[in-house]
Image (cartoon, rainbow, N blue to C red):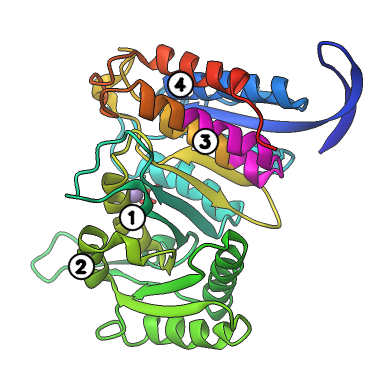
Amino acid sequence: MKKRVCKTKKEVSICKSYKIAVIPGDGTGPEVIREGVKVLDAVSKRMGFKLDYTYYDFGGERYLRTGETLPDSAIEELKKFNAIYLGAIGHPDVKPGILEKGILLRLRFELDQYVNLRPVKLYPGVDCPLKDKKPEDIDFVVVRENTEGLYTGSGGFLKKGTADEVAIQVSINTRKGVERCIRYAFEYCKKRNKKKKLTLCGKTNVLTFAFDLWERTFYEVAKEYPDITTDYAHVDAITMWFVKNPEWFDVIVTDNMFGDIITDLGAMIQGGMGIAAGGNINPEGVSMFEPIGGSAPKYTGKNVINPLAAICAGGMMLEYLGEETASKLIERAVIEVTSKHLKSLAAGKMGYSTTEVGDLVAKYVSELPLEG
Ligand code: IPM
Ligand code: MN
């Protein structure tokens, strides 16, 4: 973070400046990122800090044009930023896996963003598919391990294409990787200061090696956090409880694959992909913030996609940068929009265009009274 002279309306003051790498990416990514940047600009202007954006064209179009997913220089270059703001990766003309592995997962791995932080929060005015559940019932955060498990690409084929073919895909769980993720979850739960309950989500009854390590580490680290209630749930059971008793949860920690799966369910109970945001966090390095929904090719260019997930990801980015008031302001503005304006969070059904939703949030960000 650099300090520089910053001009607001009436005064010239020293203000903070953050360097943000923006990767709009594929499909509807650029549309939602545009609204996200609109809101970030409104909030930074109001709060008196500066965001310096550098845009990168990584994604499907570039790959189809050049055959390159990420240039080798990209990782080192991205390390120079305070944060990365990502739209979506995934192109209908590119075979599944190439862009995901070559861009998204590579960034997560090489920047060692070992936590994928995914809040699940039902905002006022948002239609919840669960009967009788209110905003106070759905407010938890999933801490998903983001660099290990089934995602490392470890494994291979034997006798591929023959009747004797063997395919092996190994889940890698290291003490170091598991422990740092669990520690992050305990710290996060403590700082969040709500129910102060951390649930380990695993499958100790079947995955008796991987989740034995997770369980032992979890209860060892728990001893350092006597104020936090610990709990355990099998991954299959947790999907049931997300639907039946989401109010039980505060913070959940889990491995990469289970975290991937349960956060899609989480997104649905908070009203859909239109609002679900996430952060790929390296607490000691560069973190990357993204709407978790994907590139939604069928809505591309139509100005109908919901930009709130990208806007909320921008809010998470500001919180991570230490601009907590600004982040809170974005959340409050989003709540104004969900509770007073949008008919639905679904693409094409909001009653507003993508641009109009961005305009609305930006307007509230500029006009809402600041909380004492
Ligand atoms: C996500 C996505 C990615 C994942 C895909 C696109 C590789 O589903 O961010 O949840 O599995 O992590
Ligand atoms: Mn996913």
Please identify, in this view, whether the residue under mark 4 or under mark 2 is nearer the observer: 4
Task: Residue at the far front: name it.
Answer: 372
Check disc 2 and report the residue beneath it.
159
Relative to 73, residue 219 above or below: below
Please identify, in this view, whether the residue under mark 4 or under mark 1 is nearer the observer: 1
Residue 151 is drawn in which quadrant? bottom left
Residue 295 picture location, percent across and down: 35, 30
Which mark, by number, is residue 30?
4
Left or right? Give the position of 53 relative to 91. right
Please identify, in this view, whether the residue under mark 1 or under mark 2 is nearer the observer: 1
10 Å crowding of disc 1: few (<14), some (14-19), many (20+) = some
> Does 322 appear in magenta?
yes
Q: Is residue 72 visible?
A: no
Check disc 1 and report the residue beneath it.
137
Please identify, in this view, whether the residue under mark 3 or under mark 1 is nearer the observer: 1
Gap in angstroms between the C-alphas marked 4 and 1 = 33 Å
Residue 48 picture location, percent across and down: 77, 25
Residue type at the position of mark 3:
Glu
Residue 134 picture location, percent across and down: 30, 48
Please identify, in this view, whether the residue under mark 3 or under mark 2 is nearer the observer: 3
Name which of mark 1 and mark 2 comes first in the sequence. Answer: 1
Name which of mark 3 and mark 1 comes first in the sequence. Answer: 1
Q: Secondary structure at mark 1?
A: helix
Tell me where the magenta segment starts and ends, as one range.
Answer: 317-334
* Residue in view at x 42 percent, y 34 percent: 309
Gap in angstroms between the C-alphas marked 3 and 4 = 21 Å
Left or right? Give the position of 190 relative to 26. right
Task: Looking at the picture, tell me which residue is in the foreground, 26 or 258.
Answer: 258
